[in-house]
Image (tube, rainbow, N blue to C red):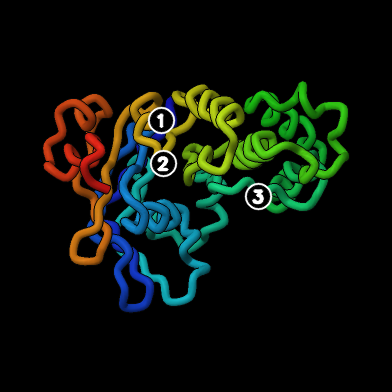
């Protein structure tokens, strides 16, 4: 079954009196990968964190607007834990728990009430999905912190996938990795298209052009982040409708 679309309608994120991004609207087609690009400080990560309510834990942070998963308005939900099972997130720096490799996957399953008898099978399935099973199957009880950076990031992706989400949010998942590891993780992300709806922040325009189905360009205007253009990848890079997009993609701005 195709995963649902993800739509943001006029989303605003404020920290106290400071606006991080205002009136941001975009739609990620079900099973597609959208790249969220733009210069530092334009609100990309804030926008990403608002989708699965990671911003709830930040004092003084306010989010308004609507977020829809398919036809459901998920921004109105009161239970962020259920939401985060549907919408997983992977961060820039690999952040495995200081536990064994297998316990990094058992822990979220336990927290979400998955029966003990099912946890190891689901963990193996997730490790296979990220191409890590053959590399770690002989040391599952060793610390995850002993893995390489690229392996740690794939483990973090597996940790998000083990809960069987519909959407995966990725905040610059390759930027902290060496080129070889980055290529492996990028290829993994491409392989997830069709099975998950993907929204990925990246500063790497070449990467966005290589792997994204659509692109949203964020910018800073009057000290506040905003969306200046959101369209298919080829349209944004080859026939941009906004002069800021044209300048940014040509390397003349940002």
> Which mark is nearer the camera, 1 or 3?
1
Task: Examine the image and state in which quarter residue 200 appears.
Answer: top left
In this rendering, the answer to whether 25 lies above or below 193 is: below
Q: Which of the pair 184/28 is nearer the observer?
A: 184
Kindly identify the residue that appears in the image at 56 percent across and 30 percent down. 179
Q: Which of the pair 180/212 is nearer the observer?
A: 180
Q: Position of residue 87 (x, y in %)?
A: 50, 45
Q: Residues within 10 Å of mark 2 (few under 14, many from 20)?
A: many
Q: Which mark is residue 105?
A: none
Which residue carries the number 2 mark? 202
Question: Helix, strand, or loop for circle 1?
Answer: helix
How far apart marks 1 and 3 lie (CA) works out to 22 Å
Q: Position of residue 231 (x, y in %)?
A: 22, 34
Q: Residues within 10 Å of mark 1 (few under 14, many from 20)?
A: some
Residue 70 appears in the picture as rendered: yes
Which residue carries the number 1 mark? 207
Q: Earlier in the sequence, mark 1 or mark 3?
A: 3
Task: Examine the image and state in which quarter residue 60 appears.
Answer: bottom left
Q: Earlier in the sequence, mark 2 or mark 3?
A: 3
Tag 1–tag 2 contact (CB < 8 Å): yes
Question: Helix, strand, or loop for circle 3?
Answer: loop
Q: Which mark is residue 95?
A: 3
Kindly identify the residue that appears in the image at 72 percent across and 44 percent down. 114
Q: Earlier in the sequence, mark 1 or mark 2?
A: 2
């Amino acid at each position: 079954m195709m995963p649902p679309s993800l739509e943001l309608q006029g989303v605003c994120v404020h920290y106290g009196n400071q606006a991080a991004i205002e009136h941001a609207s975009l739609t990620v087609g079900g099973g597609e990968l959208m790249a969220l690009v733009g210069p530092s400080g334009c609100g990309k990560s804030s926008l990403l964190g608002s989708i699965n309510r990671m911003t709830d834990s930040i004092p003084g942070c306010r989010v308004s607007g609507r977020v829809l998963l398919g036809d459901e308005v998920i921004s109105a939900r009161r239970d962020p834990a259920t939401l985060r099972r549907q919408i997983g997130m992977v961060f820039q720096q690999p952040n495995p728990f200081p536990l064994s490799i297998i316990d990094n996957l058992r822990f979220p399953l336990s927290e979400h009430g998955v029966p003990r008898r099912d946890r190891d099978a689901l963990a193996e399935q997730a490790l296979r999905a990220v191409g890590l099973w053959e590399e770690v199957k002989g040391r599952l009880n060793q610390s995850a912190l002993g893995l390489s950076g690229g392996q740690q990031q794939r483990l973090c992706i597996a940790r998000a996938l083990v809960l069987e989400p519909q959407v995966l949010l990725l905040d610059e998942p390759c930027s902290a990795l060496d080129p070889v590891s980055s290529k492996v993780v990028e290829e993994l992300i491409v392989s997830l298209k069709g099975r998950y709806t993907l929204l990925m922040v990246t500063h790497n325009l070449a990467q966005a052009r290589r792997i994204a189905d659509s692109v949203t360009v964020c910018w800073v205007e009057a000290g506040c982040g905003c969306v200046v253009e959101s369209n298919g990848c080829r349209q944004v890079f080859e026939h941009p409708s906004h002069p800021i997009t044209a300048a940014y993609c040509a390397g003349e701005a940002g």
